[in-house]
Amino acid sequence: MAAPRCETEGIIRPDGDCKYGTVLDWCRNVVCAKGPGETCGDEWWERGQCTPGTYCACGRCHGCSANLECHFC
């Protein structure tokens, strides 16, 4: 599978506060990070990336966020 085409690069997309902070997507755009229990992953992170302190497993963010919200299998 080919990498997704980037229509934009280096764009800051979040309009409001991001509860779990921000991360860079595949195209280096700033997007909201996903929190514990939220969907994540796919080959090019189309479903999002997890906030620092958590990790993506089985399509969900696991672990504890900086504000101590936690999700485990």
Image (tube, rainbow, N blue to C red):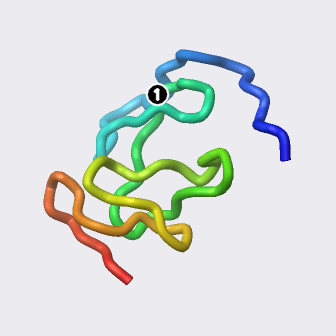
Horizontally, is 42 left or right of 25 in the view? right
- To which quarter of the image does residue 72 belong? bottom left
How many numbered marks are there?
A: 1
Residue projecting furthest to the front: 1
Place of residue 70 in the rendered image (x, y in percent of width and height, measured from the top left): 24, 70
Horizontally, is 20 left or right of 69 in the view? right
Residue 12 versus residue 54 in the image, above or below:
above
Residue type marked 1: Val
Residue at (74%, 21%) from the top-left corner?
A: 7
Residue projecting furthest to the bottom: 73
Residue denoted by label 1? 30
Place of residue 3 in the rendered image (x, y in percent of width and height, measured from the top left): 77, 37
1 vs 20, nearest the viewer: 1
Place of residue 48 in the rendered image (x, y in percent of width and height, measured from the top left): 53, 49
Residue 21 versus residue 46 in the image, above or below:
above
Residue at (21%, 65%) from the top-left corner?
A: 69
Residue 26 versus residue 57 in the image, above or below:
above
Residue 12 versus residue 42 in the image, above or below:
above
